Image (cartoon, rainbow, N blue to C red):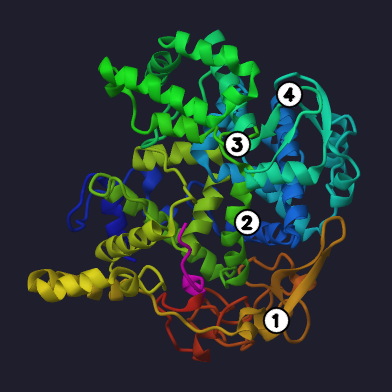
Amino acid sequence: MDLRILNDIAADPSTTGPAQVGDGPPSYLNPAEQVLCVDNVVNPTSLHAHLALLRWFNVLENQDKTLDNIFLIKAELRYMLWLNYLNQRRPAQADMIVPPIDVAYIWHAHLLSPFRYYEDILRLYPGSHHMLDYAFPLEKLHNIVTGGFKIDLQSEMTWLEHTHNAEPYVLTLAEIDTRPLEFICPWCNKASQVQWQTWAKIKTEKGPDFRCSHCSAVCSADTLSGRRFLNDVTHYQQDSARFLAGGILTSTTGAYEEAKIATEHQLLFQDHETTWQMELNNGLSWQRCQWMEIVQTLRNVVDDLKRNLKYKSFRKATIGRIRGSYMGIIAPFSIDLVAAVIRQRVFTKKMCAMNLDTPNGLASSVRRYFMFLMLMKKFRYVYTGHSFVPTLDIDLAWHTHMLFPSMYRTYTIAALGRIINHDDTIPQTKLDSNLVETSSRWYEVYLEPYTTENLVSKYLNIWRILFGFITPLYGLRVIYKAIKLHNATRRRTNVNNKERSSCGGGSCAVYFPMYYGPGDYGYGMGPGGAGACAGGRCGGFGYAGAGCGAGCGGGACGGCKSSNCGGGCGGGCGGGCGSGGGACRGDESAQCNGNCSGCDGGGAYEG
């Protein structure tokens, strides 16, 4: 990749034509510095630690769906205790304890929705701006991994002290099953006990319900989330600084525009106080908390605003974002974190199955992530309304960056002029079309392939083909686009299971006795022992060394020898004795040019 192209993009955000050599970008966008370390936190070391954490997350999943849901729901409740710990004790980042792994699981998913995370912290902890500065303790959790998964005793003691011994540091399903959930009815304020299986169905299936044993109110995801919305309307009317979820950040830029927020809230809730008061007065009735009733009230308010020509002052999608931040969501967050964790498992499984955890593979991810950001910067105006779809290796670097929320916001504002949101709920059909456009833009700017996905098949549907035959000029355009997409497709290298394990030695089973049991922890056992293969540890990534054979080597332990493909120690070409995928055919003089599975990560992730 010619750094002159990146220099030009970084220097001029409005350019959309062919790249020209400029005077150079601002210091914070210097490609020569950024391609190996973006924002001081996205680098091969942090990506390696993130991959290790994802492997740990992967073994937390229980094959019994009900038990798995119960575990995640309980973890979400414990996550609230964790946020309270950060708010009340205000530890310095360096003094923060290691969160329980189930809590880290939920926090990780929350951070991957940067808009929702920012809004939730602002709403739930008003005035506690220090909460937005905390970063995910990736290094501390990685130290637990490399230390053999031993519990940090100081962290355990602090957690037990904070929770008054009510919550164990290590969450087990046996502990959950022995205690039913204490439920406070929002209509009569009386406590009753609910079985976890019942609560899990209400939380995840949305349809089931139960009746309060005291007032007979029907408690379901619909009525409970409706009551939460009406409660927040009441809180806003009592304190105009308490904005509602979904109505804070501008959806296109992520900006906090207080004047617009205040105007919208006043028009919606203060100027129509009588309308809402009727709804709130009936809030003692669970029937009035059904979303069918609430949506009708919202429509009446919006219709009145349109009649009085006041709706034009609203930001795009504000009403929909507010409604989506409450409907069906029982917890106090603006996103269903249990559902978010489950969605992220697709990404996690793909990451655990691929061959990215090599020095060259991780360095390539950082480089391509910076190029991805610069691509969004270049086309920020001409690509409005579309989403840029990352490949799996880019997405890993992107996720890693979002684990440092304050730095992520500052950096993306400085680099791109807005905060980039991350959305894993885009429908598959839209993902496919956006991936095609992203790949086309990538090749147009960088003249290198983007993904191993079959872009031509995603682009050529039956209607394009038929219309191309009928209209020759359009047909030529389709052919040109198909050729361009073919060039934007990276060659996929076939990798069998043996090659996916380091040095063909299989995976090392690592046991987590305090959680669920054995899980494959991604590092292979190489020939000649379970440590560094031939030439010792590779590029400083031998953390698990003697334990799991994470080290690579300069010898011919699976291919590449000490050649140029992948840096000579099982690197980016998926070779050597790293966790690579084929070793570049074992040719010590071969150059992969970024086209093999180790560089690409064995596939694209569309999310």
Q: Residue 88: which disc?
A: 4
> Which residue in the structure is indicated by mark 1?
533
For badge 1, the amino acid type reads Cys
Q: Is residue 102 visible?
A: yes
Q: Residue at x 55, y 83 (%)?
A: 495
What distance separates the C-alpha of mark 3 from that of mark 4?
26 Å
Q: Secondary structure at mark 3?
A: loop
The stretch in magenta equals 598-607
Q: How many marks?
A: 4
Q: Secondary structure at mark 1?
A: loop
Q: Secondary structure at mark 4?
A: helix
Closer to the camera, 405 or 58? 58
Q: Is residue 240 found left or right of 546 in the rendered image? A: left
Closer to the camera, 327 or 435? 327
> Which residue in the structure is indicated by mark 3?
329
Q: Residue 50: which disc?
A: 2
For badge 2, the amino acid type reads His
Give the dominant element type of the magenta stretch: helix, strand or loop.
loop
